[in-house]
Image (cartoon, rainbow, N blue to C red):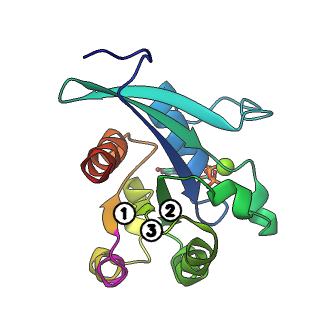
Amino acid sequence: RVNMEDYDYLFKIVLIGNAGVGKTCLVRRFTQGLFPPGQGATIGVDFMIKTVEIKGEKVKLQIWDTAGQERFRSITQSYYRSANALILTYDITCEDSFRCLPEWLREIEQYANTTVVTILVGNKIDLAEKREVLRQRAEEFADSQSMLYLETSAKESDNVEKLFLDLACKLIREA
Ligand code: GDP
Ligand code: MG
């Protein structure tokens, strides 16, 4: 394949969801293999890059984390604009983070591109004994909103690689 770039596809992926659900940990686990993420490392960094290979094609993922803006509900249009995919994250041990999902969906509706691919992620499955949101309930909600659904643990590295690879596969299919 003749390609001037060092990749075949470039996708922008944006993480959203309540503060504390594990967005930064998921990104760091995937891009750096670390848990917990290094202290202070996010300062001044808007996004992380990781290139994966899918069926022989190089897929460059530009992954945008929020640097704490979600605490002030000040994430705006610029953050969603040009996102190819959104990872909407909640914490399975925090009912409140699940109940806020409709608010996030309204923001997506308002600001994101209509072609955006959204995956719902229930994080912290290593804390199974503290689970507040049943898997079936989350699956049904995701289904009703035409979202993919996956449960992860940034801490144990469960499904983290799969999350980004599944997303990349879906983005390639729809590109
Ligand atoms: P963010 O505000 O959404 O970026 O959340 P962080 O990534 O900063 O994580 C918030 C807290 O949850 C931190 O104390 C993390 O150590 C913890 N955390 C994140 N992911 C997991 C996980 O998969 N399992 C457990 N047990 N704790 C996690
Ligand atoms: Mg964070």
Image position, residue 147 (x, y; %) = 35, 70
Lower sequence index among marks 3 and 1 = 3
| First to last magenta residue range | 141-147
Q: Which mark is residue 128?
A: 1
**Which of the two residues, 43 or 86, is positioned nearer the viewer here?**
86
* Circle 2 residues within 10 Å: few <14, some 14–19, many ≥20: many
Which residue type does callout 1 highlight?
Ala
Question: What residue is at 54 percent from the left and 77 percent from the top?
Answer: 105
Q: Magenta span has 69?
A: no
- Position of 8 with respect to 102 (left or right) is left
Say which residue label 2 marks.
89
Q: Is label 2's Cβ within 8 Å of ligand 1? A: yes
Q: Nearer the viewer, residue 79 or 103?
A: 79
Where is residue 113? Give x, y as percent: 53, 64
Helix, strand or loop at label 3? It is: loop
Q: Nearer the viewer, mark 3 or mark 1?
A: 3
Residue labelled with disc 3 = 92
Q: What residue is drawn where x is 77% and y is 57%?
A: 69
Left or right of 38 on screen, residue 52: left
Dot 2: what SS?
strand
